[in-house]
Image (spheres, rainbow, N blue to C red):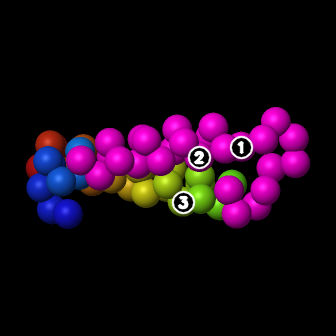
Amino acid sequence: MNTADDIKKRMAELEILIRETKERLPAHSTKPPVMMDLLACEDEYDALRKKLADLKNG
């Protein structure tokens, strides 16, 4: 995943996963595996956003 297009494509996939995972979250008693999935997707998304910014700047 070295090109900006690859990064943007993965970010779009992660946006969908994040949205779907948030929809699975119950109002009460959030299940740890679901929360872990959400956090992992958000972490990867943040890392890709930084990598994309680095590509644009340098």
Q: Nearer the viewer, mark 1 or mark 3?
A: 1
- Residue corresponding to mark 3: 40
Label 3 element class: helix
Give yes or no for contact between labels 2 and 1 (Cβ–Cβ under 8 Å).
yes
Give yes or no for contact between labels 1 and 3 (Cβ–Cβ under 8 Å).
no
Near mark 1 (Cα within 10 A), the count class, few <14, some 14-19 or many ≥20, is: some
Q: Amino acid at mark 1?
A: Leu
- Residue corresponding to mark 2: 21
Q: Amino acid at mark 2?
A: Thr
Location of residue 50 in the rendering, given as x and y in whole percent from the top left corner: 33, 49
Residue displayed at 24% across by 47% down: 9
Residue displayed at 14% across by 47% down: 5
Q: Quadrant of the N terminus?
A: bottom left
Tell me how far mark 2 sits from mark 1, CA to CA: 7 Å
Q: Is residue 34 visible?
A: yes
Location of residue 54 in the rendering, given as x and y in whole percent from the top left corner: 22, 50
- Residue corresponding to mark 1: 25
Q: Quadrant of residue 44?
A: bottom left
Q: Quadrant of residue 8?
A: top left
Total count of labels: 3
Residue displayed at 82% across by 36% down: 27
Tell me how far mark 1 sits from mark 3, CA to CA: 15 Å
Q: Magenta part of the protein: which range?
A: 9-34
Label 1 element class: loop
Tell me how far mark 2 sits from mark 3, CA to CA: 11 Å
Location of residue 42 in the rendering, given as x and y in whole percent from the top left corner: 51, 50
Q: Amino acid at mark 3?
A: Ala
Q: Is residue 35 left or right of residue 20?
A: right
Near mark 2 (Cα within 10 A), the count class, few <14, some 14-19 or many ≥20, is: some
Residue displayed at 52% across by 38% down: 19
